Image (cartoon, rainbow, N blue to C red):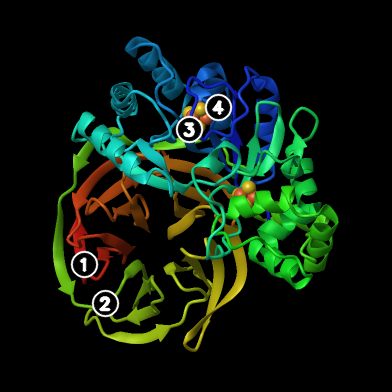
Amino acid sequence: MRFQPTEVLFSPTADCNLDCPHCTTKKSHQKLSIKVAGDFLSGCCKTGVKRVGFTGGEPFLNPEFLYSITRRAVEEGMLFDRITTNGVWYKNKAELKSVLERLRASGYDGDICVSVDAFHRQSLKKLALFVEIAALVWNRPDIVSIAFVGKALESATRKKLKHLARLVSKGVMLKKIKIDISPIGKASRFRTPWGKKWFKDDYCAGPGNTLFVLPSGDVKPCCGYATDSDRLTIGNIRRDSASDIIERAGNDHFITAVFGAGLGKIRINMEKSGFKFPRKTDNHCFFCHYLLTEVPRDLLKKCLRALKFAVSAIALTSILANHSYVYGAEIRLKRSADFKAIEAAVIKKTPIPRWYHEGLFYDGKNMYVANGECGMVWVLDPETGKVLSELEGPGKFTESIIGTGDGKFLLTDWDDEKLYLVNISGKKIFVEKEIFSFSPAHPAGVVLAGERLFVITWTRGFGTKFHILEFDKKFNFIGRVTIKDIMDPAHMAWDGKYLWVTSWFSKTVFRVDINTWEITGSFSSPATKATGIAWDGRYLWITGTYDDLYCMSVS
Ligand code: SF4
Ligand code: SF4
């Protein structure tokens, strides 16, 4: 673990239309400069930061910032994470609709997270209207998720959430995310910080590994509750570039210790040196805040030095250079005007052992079946379904394996988030070279289409995003295609003319023209939860999670 930011999160203003009793934001009318933030965003992209999000104060009180930075992020080919809002910043329905429509027209396609709990005293009727209009504008019933504060006033929060659920239409989906209150500042009135249990180390998963930019331009390494502390300021976008800031954070003993060694190790080191904490706490950010405000500086310094987890600036920069990529211009996969249903028939169904079947690859004689969830890769006879050999993959979740035509193979691993060039020897698959890290995305299917190589990726978060990434034969990254019209795209086959893409969710197989990036047709998959697909020169072969192998003719 180390500090390696994957997202830039802007707070366009510290202003807010609400005054929540637990709020730690220092309110002011200060606004973040669009020009400075835009240039910083481009710098972030070059260092490998691939996602952008917005938070507050109330970010919709500075809508021009949202439109401009969204347009810039689209130009840079970045992904959107979420906008966190209280959902009631607008004066009337016309204003609400116009702001959201302009944001959509600017290219925003991320999620919207609304804070709703006993602390946020907004009108639920007004909030329900926000949810409805957002779902309508983006034509996405799941675009809004609810973030609520946990471990304080929980029954009042539950009541409020139930009431909101009654106010929104049935088709709208509201995912819930619980964020435990950190008893810091005004919020310390609502929960006692100390208890009987120590936190488990999580290396700041969630709020961490973020370049959080405040309206003043100050940058923090996370959006956790202790960010008020100057000790967590790693630069300012008015004077520092993104790479300078990341480099500085890589040299900061506190940040490298928190993200590298973990808060738990800092605690143990402090106790070993004789420091006594009042009691135990299960809240990371409170503990972090306590270290920064209550522990004598010299003692903390001594303990951090002992951890020796500071990553040298040079090492960090080279890590980022190796793993980063700059996206090309974004293309969207869309249905063609002459999209049609394809006639397809099952020629043969071959029972194969039940497992979490993922990608298929046909080598001219045998079928390779990659199995996720700690499964082996099978080499089987497609006529009988008999497993001829079982191969141990390099990781725990082999998504896909295909031959390169020269005795080597390409393999994607979902958990590792990587594409590997591999060799098979005996019953093992050995990594010859790590080709690409997709982090924070997971790779699914991989396919060679002549001189072009494609990999499907899923980027989890508040609403999964799907892409096809393209590489040339030498594995140089070329660009990416956003997939909107195929839900849960899983694996691909190439028949010499078209790309065939399975959809795990919709039990459908889609035909794609890779010259125009249009979906020209589809047919229903015989495998429920369709995954692997392969072309044998005449027929398509399809499998699915815990399903059999189907040989199909297509018109
Ligand atoms: S909506 Fe958010 S920023 Fe505004 S007062 Fe409440 S907690 Fe603070
Ligand atoms: S523990 Fe500290 S560094 Fe980690 S997220 Fe919380 S405030 Fe940020």
Position of residue 440 in the picture relative to residue 381 (left or right): right
Q: Assess mark 4: CB under 8 A from ligand 1?
A: yes
Mark 1–mark 2 CB contact (< 8 Å):
yes
Distance from disc 4 to disc 1, alpha carbons, whole Å, reads 56 Å
The answer to whether any part of residue 287 appears in the image is yes
The earlier-in-sequence mark between 4 and 3 is 4
The earlier-in-sequence mark between 1 and 3 is 3
Distance from disc 2 to disc 4, alpha carbons, whole Å, reads 59 Å
Residue identifier under label 4 = 57
- Amino acid on which disc 3 is placed: Ile
Distance from disc 3 to disc 2, alpha carbons, whole Å, reads 48 Å
Is 27 located above or below residue 366 in the figure? above
Residue 255 locus on image (x, y percent): 72, 53
Q: Residue at x 74, y 46 (%)?
A: 246
Q: Disc 4 or disc 1, which is closer to the eye? A: 4
Residue 148 locus on image (x, y percent): 41, 41
Residues 245 and 276: in front is 276
Q: Secondary structure at mark 4?
A: loop
The earlier-in-sequence mark between 2 and 4 is 4
- Amino acid on which disc 2 is placed: Pro
Distance from disc 4 to disc 3, alpha carbons, whole Å, reads 11 Å
Residue identifier under label 1 = 551
Q: Residue at x 31, y 26 (%)?
A: 124
Residue 382 is tagged as 2
Is 243 located above or below residue 407 in the figure? above
Residue identifier under label 3 = 83
The earlier-in-sequence mark between 4 and 1 is 4
- Amino acid on which disc 1 is placed: Cys
Mark 4–mark 3 CB contact (< 8 Å):
no
Residue 348 locus on image (x, y percent): 15, 70
